Image: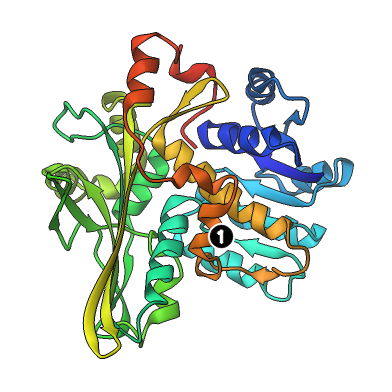
Amino acid sequence: MHRILVLGAGKIGTLISGLLADSGDYQIHLADIDGEAARSVAVAHGLDKVTAFELDATDPVQLAGQIDDNPVDAVVSGLPYFCNESVGQVAKDKGIHYFDLTEDVSVTKAIRKIAQGADRAFVPQCGLAPGFISIAANELIRHFDELRSVKLRVGALPQHPNNALKYSLTWSTDGVINEYGNMCHAVVNGELVDVLPLEGLEEIELDGTLYEAFNTSGGLGSLAETYAGQATTMDYKTIRYPGHCAQMRLLMNDLKLNENRGMLKQILENSVPHTLQDVVIIYTAVSGMQDGRLCEENYVNKVYPAMIAGRLWSAIQVTTAAGICSVLDLVVSNAGHYKGLVRQEDFRLKDILDNRFGKYFAQGGSSAASMRAIATGATGHDNGLSGDAS
């Protein structure tokens, strides 16, 4: 029985704790600064392997005391990205594995530094992007003798857009603003460079539907550093419906709201609705030389909301939770194999897809489950679980 401390009883932390506990192999300590939120999630799960705690995990002393009083094998941070550095340091001090979902480049650099010399695994940037998309892209990269172009594209979109942004809030608002406003890593002419967010606008057509994609921060993870000098070009872009990028440029650049992110967050959360009826698009394209010929390979998938344990979970919740749960499962099930910094590209795609949690990335999904759940009122109020979008 593996003991896992999950920090944050928001939408992603809630599903992570449920998936792990329901497997029967994990005892979950679910901690949140709002103890009642954590307790309500534990009750809603109805699993004796989920125990709720009230904890301010941003206080290293409190977090260290929690681990001393209730020992665990690993900590999973479902907290906002800016909380993760102190969590990582406590994890190293206590000799436990560390996992997070951050897309923030500077926080990831701090975790890498903390991971040096650690005898436990430190696995930042789990989840979808960064996370699963890096694993999928790296798998295709392994099929080539010489690399030219590597494209990573991911989008979490409403199934039925009906506002000017053609967007609904499907995950952390802080995370969206962060990836839209910070500089982005890319490889250009074999060199690792920084490029501007909301630039590099392009069109993508998938299954007859037209999308746009543009530079956003963090989704490339460590892949650019791994393959700089080998790939001619490599970049990550976020997929949206056409017109979204122009609207966000107006808000963030022309109206200068990138310089007042608190106000931008308030505007978005007061005007853009949340939804469980989303679709996650995963697209990666790699081109290069195979046996003397120029070839291209693609991994393309659409993931829809799923009914899990009798509740409807959005596609972004499912893919993010499945991403971190599958890599955690691989790490803790292979004692001693992983230690220090572990990059997403250190995992094989087949191992993820064959994993009991990675099965949620299976091809061939549809919107049927979410449509039925909405039509029958099975979702209650946002699936009946409390917590924010983290």
> Helix, strand, or loop for circle 1?
helix
In the displayed structure, does residue 232 sit left or right of residue 54? left
Which residue corresponds to the image point at 46% horizontal and 33% vertical from the top-left? 389
Q: Position of residue 85 (x, y in %)?
A: 61, 57
278 vs 77, nearest the viewer: 278
107 vs 295, nearest the viewer: 295
Q: Where the N terminus falls, by quadrant?
A: top right
Q: Position of residue 3 (x, y in %)?
A: 79, 44
Residue 61 vertical placement versus 292 (above, below): above
In the displayed structure, does residue 96 sit left or right of residue 170? right
- Res. 336 in view: yes
Which residue corresponds to the image point at 45% horizontal and 56% vertical from the top-left? 132
Give, as a three-letter code, the residue at label 1.
Asp
Q: Quadrant of residue 112?
A: bottom right
Q: Position of residue 129 (x, y in %)?
A: 41, 54
In the displayed structure, does residue 369 sit left or right of residue 188? right
Residue 363 vertical placement versus 388 (above, below): below
In the displayed structure, does residue 117 sit left or right of residue 113? right
Which residue corresponds to the image point at 65% horizontal and 23% vertical from the top-left? 45
Q: How is the image coloured?
A: rainbow
